[in-house]
Amino acid sequence: MIERAVPGVLILLVSLVWLPPAQAEPMSPGVQRVSQVTYDERPGIEDREVITVFLVLAGLLTLIVWYGQVKTIHLSRVLVAAYVVLAVGCVLTVLESLFLGQLLNLVEHLCYLTSTCLVAFYCWSVGVGGEESRT
């Protein structure tokens, strides 16, 4: 039983990798911020975003290699879909710095929303929803 859970745990660990945002420089006392940075003035690709993409793609590679064992997990298609959509969102995070910033930002956040809904559906199906189908 435990060996069936290993791929799922590996995927979960990779997907939970989160690097803290870059720290803003403290302002000197008495200095007021004159303007806010607009979306178009956003800096280029950040290192933490690229690292996150590599980690997510490594998780995706692990998912592909271990797919034979992953598909033995109850409702594995939902989990796989959630991870793939999460991976697409991470890739879009980097791409939005290069072109179509606002559009890709919207699609990125829709990917995160979809991934979260799929994981919530999976948790409900295994927990509460699973109880109804077992009785």
Image (spheres, rainbow, N blue to C red):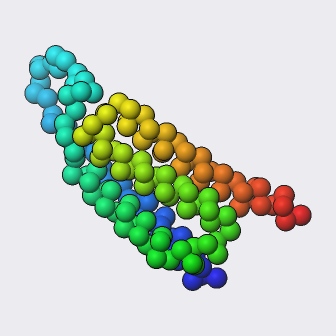
Q: Quadrant of the C terminus?
A: bottom right
Q: Between 2 and 84, which is closer to the camera in this rendering?
A: 84
Q: Quadrant of the N terminus?
A: bottom right
Residue 133 is situated, as x and y percent measured from the top left of the image, at 84, 61
Residue located at (37% from left, 63% from top): 57
Residue located at (53% from left, 74% from top): 67
Residue 45 is situated, as x and y percent measured from the top left of the image, at 22, 45
Residue located at (36% from left, 45% from top): 92
Please determine whether, in this image, residue 123 is positioned above or below residue 134.
above
Say which quarter of the image contains residue 26.
top left
Please determine whether, in this image, residue 57 is positioned above or below residue 102.
below
Residue 87 is situated, as x and y percent measured from the top left of the image, at 42, 55
Residue 132 is situated, as x and y percent measured from the top left of the image, at 84, 58
Q: Is residue 37 left or right of residue 111?
A: left
Say which quarter of the image contains residue 15.
bottom left
Please determine whether, in this image, residue 13 is positioned above or below residue 99.
below
Residue located at (14% from left, 29% from top): 27
Q: Between 46 and 100, which is closer to the camera in this rendering?
A: 100
Q: Residue furthest front?
A: 99
Please determine whether, in this image, residue 100 is positioned above or below residue 46.
above
Q: Is residue 133 left or right of residue 48?
A: right
